[in-house]
Image (cartoon, grey):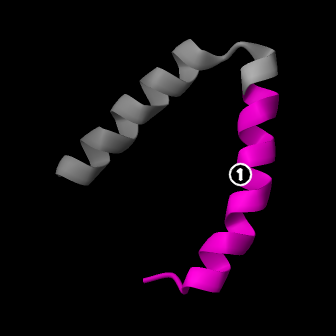
Amino acid sequence: MFDFPVIGIALVPATQGLSVLRDLRVIPMLSSLRRVVEGFLHV
């Protein structure tokens, strides 16, 4: 498991990345990626 400080540090670039992705309008790709991730988690 990750440590909470590591998660906090990772959240900063993650939120910036999300804002960039929102600007690029790649929401359909994100939804398909989420489906792939959910598929891996259910294996």
Image point (74%, 72%), residue name: 9
Front residue of 42/18: it is: 18
The magenta stretch is: 1-21
Label 1, secondary structure: give it. helix
Which residue position is annotated with label 1? 14
> Left or right: where does residue 35 sit relative to residue 6?
left
Front residue of 1/39: it is: 1
Residue 17 lies in the magenta stretch? yes
Which residue reaches farthest left?
43
Q: How many numbered marks appear? A: 1
Expressed as whole percent of the image width and height from the top left, the position of residue 40 reads: 29, 48
Front residue of 33/23: it is: 23
> Left or right: where does residue 36 sit relative to residue 10?
left
Instruction: Inspect the image, locate mark 1, and give the three-letter code of the amino acid beneath it.
Output: Ala
Expressed as whole percent of the image width and height from the top left, the position of residue 24 reads: 79, 17
- Quarter occupied by residue 25: top right
User: Dividing the image into 4 quarters, which one contains the N terminus?
Assistant: bottom left
Vertical order, 2 against 26 (above or below): below
- Magenta: main secondary structure equals helix
